[in-house]
Every structure is written in C-alpha cells, then in structure tokens.
Image: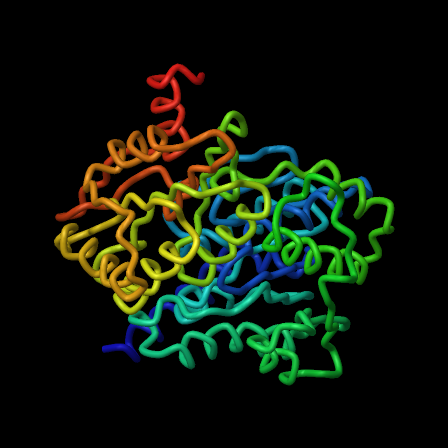
Amino acid sequence: MRLLRSIWHFVWALLSAAYCGFPSRRLTLIGITGTKGKSTTLELLSDMLEETGVRTALLSSVYVKVGAERKRNFTGNSMPGRGFIQRFLRSAVRAGCRFALVEVTSQGVLQHRHRFISFDVGGITNLAPEHIEAHGSFTAYRDAKLAFFRAVARSSRATKRLFVREDDEAVSPFAALAPGITTRFTLDDTLMPPGAFGEVNAENAALAAAIARWLGVPEEAIGRALRKFRGLPGRMEFVQKEPFGVVVDYAHTPDSLTKVYASLQKDYAGLVCVVGAAGGGRDRWKRSAMGSAAAKHCRFVVVTDEDPYDEDPAAILAEIEQGFKAQNFSAYETLLDRRAAIRRAIGLARPGEAVVLTGKGSETGIHRARGLVEPWDDAEAARQALRARGLL
C-alpha cells in the first residue's frame, strides 16, 4: 500500500508539472529545508532579492506571494500537494517573476512534491528531531531532507548550489553530499543589525545572506533588507513589549522551545510560559522533553491544549507534566482551555518579564476530534487578555 501511494504521488507530480508546462524551467528556483526557520529564511531572501529591483514569488507555511500580491497560506501545509506548487510556479512565470522561493518539507519530499521542479539552489536551516512517528526514526526524517539535496545536486541546471552551515554538526551529512557544489557558511559571515532578535533569526539571516551573495545581491542590499525586516506573524511576534513582553512563537519542539526561551532570557527578568505539545497522535516522544525545556527556563508554566485531534487532551498534558517532575519543577498549572491559559499567564506576569505563547504561531485553527477545527489566533487571544487587564 505504501508503494502504491508513493507511485500515485509521483504520477500526480509529473502530470501537474506537465499540465502547467514545467514552469520551473523559466524561473530561478530556491528551496529551503530544515526543521525550523524555513519561512523566515525565505522571507529574508525574498526581501534581499527585491532590494535589487527584481520580482519574486514565495511559498511558505505563512504566505503565498507572487510579485506584489501576498496572501496567507491557509492550505494547512507548508508544501501543499495536488498540483498546488506547479500552479504557484505557473502564476510566478505569468506575473513576470524571476525568482521563486519554496519551503521544502520532509513529508512533502516523501510525497514527491519536489519532483519535476528544476531547483537552482538548496539550503538547510538546521536539523533536530521532528515528525518521528510519521517517518519512523530521526534517520528517516533526515534522509527525506537529504533526498531534496540529492535532487538539487542532480538537477539539470547548468549552475546549482547547496548551502550548509559550517558550524552545525547536525547538518554535516548535507555538506558531505556534494562538496563540489556546496557553500559552507557561518553565523559570523553576516552582521545582524540592532533590533534583529535572537540566535534563531541570526541563523536564518546567515543562510539567506549566503544564498543572496551567490545570486549576485550586493552587500548594501542585503544590509538594507535585514534592517527593514520586522519578522513574520507567529515567529517571535511581539504583541506587547512594556510593562512586560508578550511573545507569540511557532516553536513546537524541545530544541526550538529552548532557543526561544534562551533568546528571550537575555532581555527579560523572567518568563511566564504557555506550553502545549504540537498535536495529538504524533511525536509523543517530545512531550516530556518540552516539559523539561520549559521547567529549565520558565518562572511559571501554564500547560494547555494545542491540537489534540482524536487524542485525549488531558492525557497529552499529563505527558508534558512528566518533564516537570523530572526537573523537580512545581511552578505550573494545567488549563485545557487555551484562552483561559493565556489569560492566566498574562495575569501572572510581572513588569520586566515576558509571557511566551508557543506552539500555534500564526496558525488559525485548533484541530480537535472528528476533524473539527476551532478558529483560533494566539495573538488575538493575547490582546483580549491584555485589554481585560487594562493594558491595551
């Protein structure tokens, strides 16, 4: 059955590319993979390119952009299937775009959504365990991303390039894949301007800048794009900065959670954190690890619902609690109602601290049992709680 599904996806990719006239052949194609930071990297790179006056198209988990037209990506997929990508590329060609930037996911690669797209550039942001139950192991997850790099290396393009961070051991297999066409960069290669927030954005900016340089973008244009960048919805998004910060971020793995907390701790006296576990029915391994990460960094934690699907929400929260117990951490409470959890966290915040809402980012729905989706917006829920406290 798995083989039949794979064949079906492959044939669909071929037919949709043929139907749309293989549009990638008339564009310069950049694909970004990795565990975290793909959307931000694409946005930064698009800005850098457009500083030179060219028109770009972009497909990420947050936005679908073709030239000057930008829409939110409401498909529920970072790398949508059923011919969506080929239609997007065809629209980019028709709009006169020179570059198309695409987010490449491990699950998208497994379903051949990267096939019949002629990539010029492939880059990886970072690598950490995720989607383990979907892939079967971390090795299989990594190998799916490596398959994308192989596709770029085998591309028919006359010139092609792979970009891998040199000072990140986790991505060393990607650097070894095709060393003759691989550029290795470091965080020190790109100077972040004042106000650019956190190590995660520095990582994203370094990759975007490395690719931009190879594409011929001048350093002045790269610098302008970095100075102008204000982030993406749900990616280190500040709802408020004073008297205490309120931050919404998509972090939903132990590694990304730790990076967000560590970055915020540089500027805030303490963290009050709202934590879920990124979905029922998958990646159970990370639940207690996320609890441990929160226990190490947060003054107080409110554990709440995120996307339970058909799993018992209370059981998910109980698994997160195991991470607290492993750290002998007792400064937490559980509230299944996410709105109430956010209200509680904001009510507990002290001046100089930050309330950190993780897991949902800019997502617009909470997935519940029997396919039901509750409309949702973390940032708006935070604003409502702040208004109730008289702060907005």
Q: Nearer the viewer, residue 136 or 19?
A: 136
Q: Nearer the viewer, residue 380 or 100?
A: 380
The number of numbered badges drawn on the structure is: 0
Q: Which image quadrant for residue 9? A: bottom left
**Picture layout, residue 377 above or below residue 388:** below
Q: Which image quadrant for residue 338? A: top left
Percent position of residue 202, x then y: 66, 54
Percent position of residue 316, x then y: 20, 56
Q: Residue at x 67, y 43 (%)?
A: 196
Percent position of residue 348, x then y: 34, 32
Q: Residue at x 62, y 55 (%)?
A: 199
Percent position of residue 119, x then y: 63, 66
Q: Is residue 121 left or right of residue 340?
A: right
**Picture layout, residue 386 above or below residue 60:** above
Q: Residue at x 52, y 49 (%)?
A: 60
- Quadrant placement of the C terminus: top left
Q: Residue at x 34, y 71 (%)?
A: 132
Q: Which image quadrant for residue 4? A: bottom left
Q: Nearer the viewer, residue 71 or 40?
A: 40
**Picture layout, residue 158 above or below residue 383:** below
Q: Is residue 15 left or right of residue 154?
A: left
Colour scheme of the picture: rainbow
- Quadrant placement of the N terminus: bottom left
